[in-house]
Image (cartoon, grey):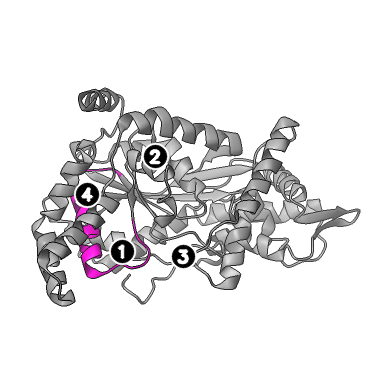
Amino acid sequence: FRKLMVRAGAQRNTRLSRPIQPFKLARGYDMIQRLIYDPQVSEAIVEHARRENVPENVAFEQARRYAREIVPSFSATVYFSIGARLARWLSKALYRISIGNFDQARLDRIDPEAAVVFVMNHRSNMDYVLVTYLVAPASALSYAVGEWARVWPLSWMIRAMGAFFIRRKDRGRLYRKVLARYVQMATAGGVTQAFFPEGGLSLDGRLQPARMGILSYIIEGYRPGGRDVIFVPVALNYDRVLEDRLLIAADKSGARRFRPPRGTISRALRAHLWQRLTGRFTTFGTAKVSFGAPMSLAAMMAEGKADVESVAREVMSRVAAVVPAVPVPLVARHLVDGGVVSRAALETRVASDIAMLDVHGVTRPDRSAEEMVADAIDLLLDRAVIGERSDGLTVVPGEEPLLAFYAASLDHLFKGEAPQLPAAAE
């Protein structure tokens, strides 16, 4: 069975522009052994045993549990035959997919031997699905996923797709060292990775400061003259974020972690299925993805800018520069303050916004202001976020936070702002 899996991966590699590296195809057991016997992890085990006053074999078993928790069990068959196809179907079933800024020639010039790391803003859990679908023809991504995905059988599926789990809490020194060494080994092995520098979903819609965790592991593990690391900025935006109301509620309560109530999910699924059965569902609007200019870690190091803060600042500025302008956020900017606004006034304002984006070198939307305003109004009316009267459009009382959430995704493009780095190192 193992030989069949290896053969399937080899056949798939002939069709990929960035083939799956041997590191990713290694057995999970072999990777766990390699990780826990790594010299740096061994030193961390000894230090942990001394600090916690426990026998070294106890600390060793703790490191083994961490390694088992982190290391994936990649299957090319599961990734491409199930995962990528499911991602394609789900993305196209829910959204009208649009590609914004994308320079194929520039991406093709990336050194084939370099480790490519896609760094993305985090708007929705659909980000994983959408980017997997778009990148599947070129390569298999290895995602860093949070504890939300450690639920059977979802956890098995995610591991088989090459993702590795990251704890958000209870991260002692030993855990951080095991995680760091896995990330560094994967990078040195040329694995194509994807992660969210913000560390989690944006609760208020704005781009968040970069957190230093995984980024610092990659930079600390890089050695001049070794395999280069190419960061590819990716920015996503949606007309409808599936979790929008949950995120707004979490932001209001101050609770970073949240679980969608089962009743809310079941009601939403029933309503969605009913819309499909009755033929009333079209899409949730546009989901748009843009790719920024790739950034070489070797080049930054040659310029003396390879410290973690400099790389984080540059990565986030490149992501921010290509955040797509989609209809609902563009229209929400001009409704969030309340009052009555006519369709004609909205069209004029959105056209002015598009012209401003042109001036600042941001990739402009691929449709006219009139089309985008019409799409946004239909979507917002359907969700009862706005109402329409004879004299214009008004915001339904209580829905202002929802409009502010979408408008915030474009704030930095119109205010000339870049996400600021946090004071903390992680």
Which numbered circle lies on residue 157?
Answer: 2
Earlier along the polypeptide chain: callout 4 or callout 1? 4
Question: Which span of residues is magenta-colored?
Answer: 166-192
> Is any atom of residue 298 visible in this view?
no
Residue at 47% of width from left, 42% of height from top?
129
Q: Which residue occupies the foreground of this view, 83 or 20? A: 83
Q: Which residue occupies the foreground of this view, 12 or 114? A: 12
Mark 1: amino acid: Gly
**Which quadrant would residue 77 be assigned to in this image?**
top left
Mark 2: amino acid: Met
Badge 1 marks a residue whose secondary structure is helix
Earlier along the polypeptide chain: callout 2 or callout 4? 2
Residue 247 coordinates in the image, percent (x, y): 57, 61
Residue at 53% of width from left, 62% of height from top?
258
In-image side of 38 versus 156 (left or right)? left
Does the CB distance between marks 4 and 1 fall below 8 Å?
no
How many other residues sit within 10 Å of disc 4, few (<14), some (14-19) or many (≥20)? many
Q: Against 403, is 131 above or below?
A: above
Does the CB distance between marks 2 and 4 fall below 8 Å?
no
Badge 3 marks a residue whose secondary structure is loop
Residue beneath label 3, please? 208
How many other residues sit within 10 Å of disc 2, few (<14), some (14-19) or many (≥20)? some
Q: Quadrant of the C terminus?
A: bottom left
Instruction: Give the Cα distance between marks 3 and 4.
Output: 25 Å
Instruction: Give the Cα distance between marks 2 and 4.
Output: 22 Å
Residue beneath label 4, please? 187
Earlier along the polypeptide chain: callout 3 or callout 4? 4
Mark 3: amino acid: Gln
Residue beneath label 1, please? 213
How many other residues sit within 10 Å of disc 1, few (<14), some (14-19) or many (≥20)? some
